[in-house]
Amino acid sequence: MCLGIPGRVLELRDEAGLRMATVDFGGVRREVCLDYTPGAGIGSYVIVHVGFAITEVDEAEARRTLDVLRAMADAGETELGEPLPEQPSRDRRPRPVPYRPIGSGAAETQAERADPPAKGTP
């Protein structure tokens, strides 16, 4: 699965013949190659995958996508190498609770781990 993260272009420059930019991902800044998005300029929002801007998006779409990524536990951290900074919530809806499968150890108590039930008992 590929993950593209939206970011806002802050600075442009030429490095060894490549169009490079500093891009802000909601508080995390990274160097990005803009060669695949020739129309992107300062203030543009781009979708970035593995250091390359692959398409442009509008600001509203970029914000919606960043909000979804913040709601996903590790998506931003996996792609960017650090977590996205928290943004103040615009509403008071509760955040989703992480899924923990039965038998993962997450729901077991210390007593259950220390004294498992005997074989043949439910």
Image (tube, grey):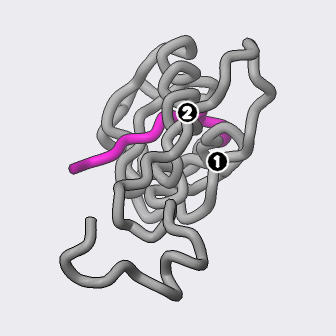
On-image quarter of the C terminus: bottom left
Instruction: Find residue 63 and name its label.
Output: none
Majority SS type along the magenta span: strand
Q: What's the amino acid at mark 2?
A: Pro
Residue 5: x, y in percent? Answer: 45, 40
Helix, strand or loop at disc 1?
loop
Q: What's the amino acid at mark 1?
A: Leu
Q: CA distance from mark 2 to mark 1?
A: 17 Å
Q: Considering only vertical position in the picture, is 79 above or below 25?
A: below
> Which residue is at the front of the view, 85 or 19?
85
Instruction: Find residue 96 and name its label.
Output: 2
The residue identified by callout 1 is 84
Q: Earlier in the sequence, mark 2 or mark 1?
A: 1
* Foreground tag (2 vs 1): 2
Classed neighbour count for the residue bearing mark 1: other residues with Cα under 10 Å, few (<14), some (14–19), many (≥20)? some
Quarter holding residue 119: bottom left
Is 85 contained in the magenta span? no
* Side (left or right) of 39 relative to 11: left
* Side (left or right) of 105 relative to 86: left
Quarter holding residue 18: bottom left
Is 3 contained in the magenta span? yes
Q: Is residue 71 visible?
A: yes
Residue 103: x, y in percent? Answer: 35, 65
* Side (left or right) of 9 relative to 74: right
Q: Considering only vertical position in the picture, is 83 above or below 60?
A: below
Classed neighbour count for the residue bearing mark 2: other residues with Cα under 10 Å, few (<14), some (14–19), many (≥20)? few
Q: Is residue 20 visible?
A: no
* Side (left or right) of 104 relative to 71: left
| Residues drawn in magenta | 1-11
> Which residue is at the front of the view, 2 or 118?
118
